[in-house]
Image (cartoon, rainbow, N blue to C red):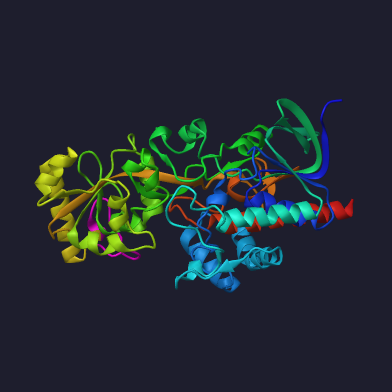
């Protein structure tokens, strides 16, 4: 007899979004199955490797709704769908409190507002198993245990490959399991398998012409399976051209000690980032996530370099909990150093005259307080601009480190998947980083992956359970 399954709801992906959806459904009495393509109990995913900070646009999750709304709207500048913004502001505190009732622990890390709810115990900042027994790893084990206690099913080595549609309604899916195609019947399907950052074909279509020159800064398991299945079923995709990530030293492409930390963001926001012609091409003042996206969008994403001086290296270079100075060098990265800009340009293979001109124009603008007149402009609202004139002079070759893609399947405020005319596709839901419409846009708004996943998953489960109760 061939293998088959039937559930009230089937969840694709066992990261935070998938397990929040599953546990919330199971505790409301539904028969739940979770499909996870990873084959062992420590299956890799970004949720397991996360830094662990729960925040909403860098505000604490317990801030008043109006504060969270303002923070998201300010950062998004009109890109985010209003009903998703409202859902986040309304439900994030509720979702975090619910996680606590399931045994998930949080602690305060430092004084920063956005670290007041960080998964406990906090991650280490070095080593390839920095996550093991900490943060997201503990969260997944905790939620997995809760699912088992509630009678839910977690299938490892199960990869969803096709949605089953009948009269415009999603009624289940097909999965690959134990070497066979297996049908799964379900009243509802929730797609929670993360972004598409590890899929070179999709990355090339939406993000970068050279995905092989972008460093995977996470588990590298997000292949966009759910997104592609939803796309074939008529789902709308939104915000596909942006991602969350950080600037890394280019040596991270072949040195695993240089990712996910240290990041080069704070050196870059203080110095100047130039291309192969030694010209600035980004607004350094917009921060690391913005610059990382711009670098990935270059014809050659490995053509960017940050140039700075000794004062920056000993100042902003020492900022952050895992600072570039001294970790870049102690972990085997390359810091180019020279007594003057001409010699530095020689080390880098950059045109010396062009680099000298770029730095001179930049310094003059900083001195005059007119960095907004540079081309491109250099904003200073968030990060101070520093003149570059204190020897020795330094440079670091850069690469874009991608953690997860911001765009994905369009959903409404109840996590229902929307078609091309903004109508829900019956029986089909999505949550977490498989979805789009909240983060990204022209200004590359970063709202928070863990919080987006928690709220959209919580809402998907509540919507499915409410519909199940009516039937």
For image coordinates 61% across by 62% down, the residue present is 88
Of residue 176 and residue 242, the one placed in the foreground of this image is 176
Residue 172 position, x and y percent, is 78, 37
Q: How many marks?
A: 0
Q: Quadrant of residue 92?
A: bottom right
Residue 14 position, x and y percent, is 66, 46
Does residue 120 sit above or below 153 in this rendering? below
Q: Which residues are magenta?
A: 372-387
Prevailing secondary structure of the magenta residues: loop
Tell whether 85 sits left or right of 442: right
Does the image show residue 334?
Answer: yes
Q: Inspect the magenta stretch and tell me whether residue 458 lies in it.
A: no
Tell whether 60 sits left or right of 232: left
Does residue 49 sit above or below 316 in this rendering? above
Of residue 197 and residue 376, the one placed in the foreground of this image is 197
Residue 125 position, x and y percent, is 43, 56
Residue 267 position, x and y percent, is 29, 56
Q: Furthest-right residue in view?
A: 471
Q: Quadrant of the N terminus?
A: top right
Q: Inspect the magenta stretch and tell me whether residue 385 lies in it.
A: yes
For image coordinates 49% across by 67% down, the residue present is 114
For image coordinates 35% across by 65% down, the residue present is 382
Of residue 375 and residue 341, the one placed in the foreground of this image is 341
Does the image show residue 386?
Answer: no
């Amino acid at each position: 007899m061939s293998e088959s399954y039937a559930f009230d709801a089937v969840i694709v992906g066992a990261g935070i979004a998938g397990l929040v959806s599953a546990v919330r459904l199971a505790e409301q009495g539904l028969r739940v199955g979770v499909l996870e393509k990873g084959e062992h109990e420590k299956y890799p995913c970004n949720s397991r490797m996360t830094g662990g900070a729960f925040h909403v646009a860098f505000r604490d999750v317990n801030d008043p709704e109006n504060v969270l709304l303002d923070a998201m709207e300010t950062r998004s500048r009109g890109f985010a769908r209003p009903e998703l913004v409202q859902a986040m502001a309304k439900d994030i505190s509720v979702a975090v409190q619910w996680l606590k009732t399931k045994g998930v622990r949080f602690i305060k890390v430092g004084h920063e507002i956005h670290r007041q709810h960080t998964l406990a115990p906090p991650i280490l900042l070095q080593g390839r198993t920095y996550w093991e027994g900490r943060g997201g790893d503990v969260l997944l084990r905790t939620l997995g245990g809760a699912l088992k206690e509630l009678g839910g099913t977690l299938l490892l080595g199960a990869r969803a490959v096709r949605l089953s549609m009948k009269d415009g309604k999603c009624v289940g899916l097909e999965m690959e399991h134990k070497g066979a195609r297996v049908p799964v019947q379900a009243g509802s399907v929730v797609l929670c398998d993360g972004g598409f950052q590890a899929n070179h074909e999709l990355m090339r279509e939406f993000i970068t012409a050279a995905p092989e020159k972008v460093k995977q800064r996470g588990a590298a398991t997000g292949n966009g399976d759910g997104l592609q299945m939803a796309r074939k079923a008529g789902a709308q995709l939104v915000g596909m051209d942006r991602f969350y990530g950080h600037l890394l030293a280019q040596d991270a492409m072949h040195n695993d000690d240089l990712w996910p930390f240290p990041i080069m963001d704070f050196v870059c926001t203080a110095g100047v980032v130039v291309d192969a012609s030694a010209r600035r091409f980004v607004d350094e003042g917009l921060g690391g996530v913005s610059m990382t996206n711009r670098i990935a969008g270059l014809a050659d994403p490995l053509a960017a370099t940050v140039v700075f001086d000794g004062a920056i290296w000993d100042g902003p270079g020492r900022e952050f909990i895992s600072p570039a100075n001294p970790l870049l060098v102690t972990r085997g990265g390359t810091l180019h150093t020279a007594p003057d800009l001409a010699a530095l340009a020689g080390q880098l293979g950059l045109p010396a005259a062009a680099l000298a001109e770029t730095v001179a124009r930049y310094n003059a603008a900083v001195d005059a307080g007119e960095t907004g007149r540079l081309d491109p402009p250099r904003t200073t609202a968030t990060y101070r601009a520093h003149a570059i004139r204190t020897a020795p002079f330094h440079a670091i070759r850069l690469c874009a480190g991608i953690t997860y893609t911001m765009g994905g399947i369009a959903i409404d405020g109840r996590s229902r998947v929307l078609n091309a005319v903004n109508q829900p596709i019956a029986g089909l839901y999505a949550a977490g980083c498989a979805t789009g419409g909240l983060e990204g846009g022209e200004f590359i708004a970063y709202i928070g992956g863990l919080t987006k996943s928690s709220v959209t998953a919580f809402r998907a489960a509540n919507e499915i359970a409410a519909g199940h109760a009516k039937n």
